[in-house]
Amino acid sequence: MLKWLAKRVGFSIITIIITIMISWALIEYSPESPANFIDNVLPPNSIAGKPTLRLELEQYLMTLKPHGNPLIDSLQYLWQVLHGNLGIDIISQVPVTTIIAQALPWTVFIVTTSILISYFLGIRLGMKIGYKRGTKVDSSLMSLFTVTRSIPVYISGALLLFFLGFELGWFPTGGAFSINVTPGFNIPFILSVIKHAFLPILTLTLANLAGWVLHMRANTIYTLGEDYVSFAEIRGINSNNIETKYVGRNAILPLYTSLIYTIGFSFGGSIFVEEIFSYPGVGHLLYNAIQYNDYPLEMGIFIILIASVVVGILLADLTYSLLDPRVKVGE
């Protein structure tokens, strides 16, 4: 058991290290530089009569991009990361850890909330329509969720923003909370946060819901063909008990690992939603960092995304046996 655990943890650490090194090398060999977007950092009208200032700034920004040996530079960067140093943001000159620490809670809030809502709702709906396979309800909902799943998240987000935000004015169109409230543990602030997060959470929930429903329906139909379900039906056990205790518990097992993976991958997918709703999360930060070729901030966010996916997979491996006694960890 301990040998297997050490092997899995070691493999996860190696995966994170190699991925970080590859990401660093890609940035190092990229032809882009922060100097390419100097006008976004220092508008032309702000340097009128000071031509040398622009040249000095261009030369300074060019020195910020790595130019040495990719292997050595990536190892040096890893050493700094292990000491908690992710570098200084090029645009704001603020430590990257400080910027990410301010944005990460907002992303965690909308991502985890949307995934949990879509997961439990999708499981319940999928189990219901799977248990009633072949009925009109089943065919109607299957058609609806198949169409819903094919709609890109940025399309559904834009539509929700346009109709519920701009046209009807029911929800705010940007930001994480109103400027009229005082941040802190107070009711006005909490209500403002919930209201501003409603549309991003709804968008991410709709994006994930169809997948959970279709997956759970397929697992339910497969489980219904098992002998123990047929035996339970012959014994005359209540259909509700069969649906939940016999079918539901076994059909949900494969979806557990998918849940952990989805949480990790959703941090990267939130970039579209956060940009549409101007939500100040990690996705919004990554969009701006890519625009300005702000490589320290890019790498800092990449590390968060990489770690969340790898750690999620590791947790799924370690905890799956707790849900399914038939699986023994380490074998």
Image (cartoon, rainbow, N blue to C red):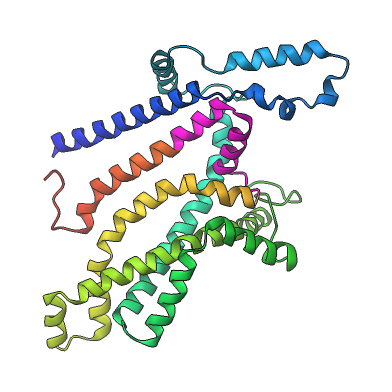
Q: Is residue 241 visible?
A: yes
Q: Disc count in the image? A: 0
* The furthest residue to the right: 49
Using the image, determine if residue 170 lies above or below residue 48: below
Q: Residue at x 28, y 65 (%)?
A: 252
Q: Is residue 248 visible?
A: no
Q: What's drawn in magenta, residue-wise?
A: 278-304
Picture coordinates of residue 2 (x, y %)? 15, 36
Using the image, determine if residue 24 lies above or below residue 253: above
Picture coordinates of residue 292 (x, y %)? 63, 30
Q: Nearer the viewer, residue 196 or 255?
A: 255
Q: Nearer the viewer, residue 162 or 115?
A: 162
Picture coordinates of residue 282 (x, y %)? 55, 41
* The furthest residue to the front: 31
Picture coordinates of residue 249 (x, y %)? 25, 68
Quadrant assignment for the N terminus: top left
Q: Residue at x 12, y 76 (%)?
A: 228
* In the image, residue 183 lies in the stretch drawn in magenta: no
226 lies left or right of 42 = left
* In the image, residue 290 lies in the stretch drawn in magenta: yes
Q: Residue at x 32, y 72 (%)?
A: 217
The quarter holding residue 5 reads: top left
Q: Nearer the viewer, residue 158 or 250?
A: 158
280 lies left or right of 41 = left
Using the image, determine if residue 91 lies above or below residue 173: above
Magenta span: predominant SS is helix
Quadrant assignment for the C terminus: top left
The quarter holding residue 225 reads: bottom left
231 lies left or right of 195 = left
Using the image, determine if residue 59 lies above or below residue 110: above
Q: Residue at x 68, y 66 (%)?
A: 164
